[in-house]
Amino acid sequence: MKGIVGRKVGMTQMFTEDGDRVPVTVVDVASAVVVQKKTTEGKDGYNAIKIGYGLAHKLQKEGMEDKWRLSKPESGVFLAAGIEVPRRHVREVRVDAAELDNYEVGQDLTAETFAPGEYIDATGTSKGSGFTGVMKRHNFRGTKASHGVHEFFRHGGSIGMSAYPARVLPGKKMPGQHGNAKVTVQNLLVYKVLPEENLILVRGSIPGPNGGIVLLRDAAKKSRRLY
């Protein structure tokens, strides 16, 4: 298992030798660095690496130009790792014991972490739509708009029961917060890697808006789809 943190730049298209169009998502992984290593022998009890991404900003107040816009515990993690410029975003990736030896604290991670043809899982925060109804949130079809229906076109219908159990069951699909949640898309193909620009081109779409932070990891399940 290996992974890297990056920023979703946006989507574009590539063309195969046969002229087929391939939609790809561009992920910028520049400034990714290993912040910490966790081992089963240590106090953590499992093997993992913490990856930092995105250079932190400095305070603009007078006399505090040398301070970072991070809390003392956050900046202390990078200070202990010997990293001069802290990172704004930190993610953790579980790795095998054998793979853990390939990483060192302070090591810069590049786009060559993955190779074209590999399958990955992409995790990000989906776009938020606010408070929405059942038609937008759960794809309900709504009520028929025929004669005699009054102000009930986009409602969800009845939600409870009669004498027994006389309540609304947990998990009922109802209006509520839509989006703005952690989402993982599995089995995406790494279509191309651009080491000079530190860009990874992933076939298909990745959760979140342009500029959102995404975590790319080895696919937990291999896709059976043929590309």
Image (cartoon, rainbow, N blue to C red):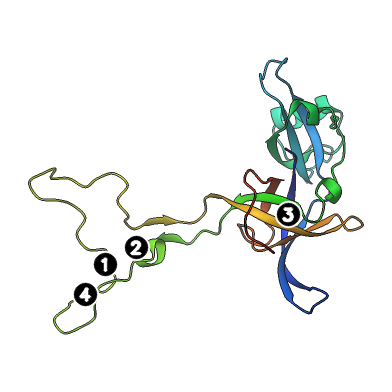
**Disc 2 vs disc 1: Cβ atoms closer than 8 Å?**
yes
In the rendering, at what x and y percent does residue 158 appear?
19, 59
104 with respect to 190 (left or right): right
Q: Which residue is mark 3?
A: 7
Kind of residue at disc 1? His
Q: Is residue 187 visible?
A: yes
Q: Quadrant of the C terminus?
A: bottom right
Dot 4 lies on which element? loop
217 with respect to 165 (left or right): right
- In three-dimensional space, the C-alpha distance between marks 4 and 2, rounded to whole angstroms, equals 15 Å
Dot 2 lies on which element? helix
**Disc 4 vs disc 3: Cβ atoms closer than 8 Å?**
no
**Disc 4 vs disc 2: Cβ atoms closer than 8 Å?**
no
Kind of residue at disc 4? Glu
First in residue order: circle 3 vs circle 2: 3
* Image depth: mark 4 or mark 1 in front: 1
Q: Which residue is mark 4?
A: 151
In the rendering, at what x and y percent does residue 189 appear?
71, 57
Q: Quadrant of the N terminus?
A: top right
Q: Which residue is mark 1?
A: 155
Q: Residue at x 87, y 28 (%)?
A: 82
In the rendering, at what x and y percent does residue 164 appear?
10, 44
- In three-dimensional space, the C-alpha distance between marks 3 and 1, rounded to whole angstroms, equals 38 Å
Q: Which residue is mark 2?
A: 134
